Image (tube, rainbow, N blue to C red):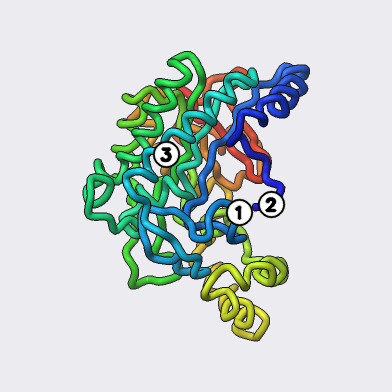
Amino acid sequence: MPNYATIDRDDCVPFWREVGERVHEHDCKFILQLSHAGRQRDIPGIEFARGLSSTGRPDPLHGFEADAMTGADIRRVVGEFAAGARRAREAGLDGVELHGANGYLITQFLSPAINDRRDKYGGSLKNRARFLLEVVAAIRAEVGRDFHLQVKLSARDFNNALQPLASEGTTLQDSLQVAQWLEAAGVDALHISAGNAFPHPKNPPGDFPVESALQTFDTMISSGKMELANYLSLASPAGQLFRLAWVNARGEKIEGINLEDASKIRAVVTIPVICTGGFQTASKEHAQNGARPRLGADACSFGIGGAERALCA
């Protein structure tokens, strides 16, 4: 997106150094999230004319076009993730988080509902996780073991939330295994969310904002093959029908929507697990729910844009 904060060039380091210093003045840590949108982008031409992805199929909601990444593309992007982490360390920040959730590039490799490759990056779960594990290995080779690295994952895709006949995509069982591979690869913490698109009925877990969506889709009509149809549909009475379908797919649960899955992932790893869960309250009961948060600075973590809670042993 235009004006998004980036760390894709060495001349970005001074900016992030100053941001980090100002945060550190308040005795806080600063972890920078590294993200690549892949095919899931709102404005064309910011990175490429067509989004790079695990697949050459356009995304089903907006129709954003994509090119399946070649081996050379994959090696280059893996190196770019590692370079971003190196710059974050040079800036004096406290760590990085890989955005592997909510439909962005890493999700596009992990999800069997998106990844249709027939090479070593597609098919089996191990192959679909290969890209993510190569990124982790490249970061560790670049910054060492003493720089904090965490990964944000969608525990479940819910790919069939709005299309019941579609495949469910990544399952919780898949994510339990990926979580263990990530811990073995040297990841320091996991951050659990849901959905293989953004927005998604499960993330953020609220009503569908028809009015603001109309404003957003208006700027995206030229970038997705389906966006004009989406815009006209939302502007008509059918927009309210879509909203009802969205709310129905979301379900009644909002508070702690991912807490159960995060707790199950916490049970198979020894590293901290953070839950993005739509928390509306800060009661101890919501934090525990079968987990055992320890009292201290890392017992809870609330992030901008959505309440998050760490599940720590």
Q: Residue at x 44, y 42 (%)?
A: 153
* Nearer mark to the viewer, of 3 and 2: 3
Crowding near pointer 3: few (<14 within 10 Å), some, many (20+)?
A: few
- Label 3: which residue? 76
**Badge 2 or badge 1: first in the primary sequence:** 2
The numbered disc on residue 2 is 2
Q: Nearer the viewer, residue 56 or 182?
A: 56
Crowding near pointer 2: few (<14 within 10 Å), some, many (20+)?
A: few
- Label 1: which residue? 46
Instruction: Relative to 28, say whether 70 is above or below.
Output: below
Q: Nearer the viewer, residue 305 or 293?
A: 305
Q: CA distance from mark 2 to mark 1?
A: 7 Å
Confirm or deny contact between disc 3 and disc 1 (CB under 8 A). no
Question: Identity of the amino acid at label 2?
Answer: Pro
Q: Quadrant of residue 181?
A: top left
Quarter of the picture containing the C terminus is: top left
Whole-percent x, y for residue 230 in the image: 58, 77
Confirm or deny contact between disc 3 and disc 2 (CB under 8 A). no
Say if residue 290 shows up in the picture. Answer: yes
Question: Identity of the amino acid at label 1?
Answer: Ile
